[in-house]
Structure formats: structure tokens, C-alpha cells
């Protein structure tokens, strides 16, 4: 992953006081919804 992306994500987590576990759940949910939208639910 591009270091700039990692740094930006880390900054957002710090600035918004988001727990890393919560952020991981959000990212997983976003990717799952994108995959479901693109390929349908199996």
C-alpha cells in the first residue's frame, strides 16, 4: 500500500479519535458492500 495512503488514514484515525478496530470494521464493510454491488450477492 502506498505510504501516503497509510499516512492519510492514520491521520484521519488520530484526528477523529477513531479506534483502529472500529476503523477496520468500517473498511471491511465498505469493501464488502462494493463487492456485493459489483458482483451481486451470492
Image (cartoon, rainbow, N blue to C red):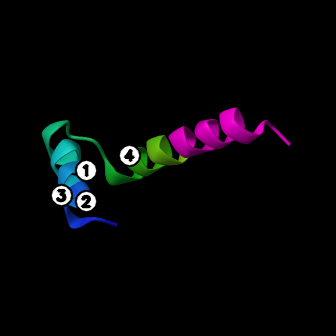
Residue 7 got which mark? 3
Q: Which residues are magenta?
A: 29-42
Secondary structure predominantly adopted by residues drawn in magenta: helix
Query: Marks 3 and 2: CB-CB under 8 Å?
Result: yes
* Residue 38 vertical placement versus 21 (above, below): above
Q: Which quarter of the image is occupied by the C terminus? A: top right
Query: Marks 2 and 1: CB-CB under 8 Å?
Result: yes
- Residue that badge 2 annotates: 6
- 6 to the left or right of 32: left
Percent of width and height locating residue 3:
22, 66
Chain-order first, disc 4 or disc 3: 3
Q: Quadrant of residue 37?
A: top right
Residue depicted at x 25% and y 59%: 6
| Separation of residues labelled 4 and 2 (CA atoms) | 13 Å
- Secondary structure beneath dot 4 equals helix
User: Considering depth in this image, is 40 or 28 the residue closer to the camera?
Assistant: 40
Query: Marks 1 and 3: CB-CB under 8 Å?
Result: yes
Q: Residue furthest front?
A: 38
- Residue that badge 1 annotates: 9
* Residue 23 vertical placement versus 40 (above, below): below
Q: Residue furthest right?
A: 42
Q: Which quarter of the image is occupied by the N terminus? A: bottom left
Percent of width and height locating residue 15:
13, 40
- Secondary structure beneath dot 2 equals helix
Q: In the image, is residue 41 part of the stretch drawn in magenta?
A: yes
- Secondary structure beneath dot 3 equals helix
- 23 to the left or right of 7: right
| Separation of residues labelled 1 and 4 (CA atoms) | 9 Å
Residue 23 got which mark? 4
Q: Residues within 10 Å of mark 3 (few under 14, many from 20)?
A: few
Query: Marks 1 and 4: CB-CB under 8 Å?
Result: yes
Amino acid at each position: 500500500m502506498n505510504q501516503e495512503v497509510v499516512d492519510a488514514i492514520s491521520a484521519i484515525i488520530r484526528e477523529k479519535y477513531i479506534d483502529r478496530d472500529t476503523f477496520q470494521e468500517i473498511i471491511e464493510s465498505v469493501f464488502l458492500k462494493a463487492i456485493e454491488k459489483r458482483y451481486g450477492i451470492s
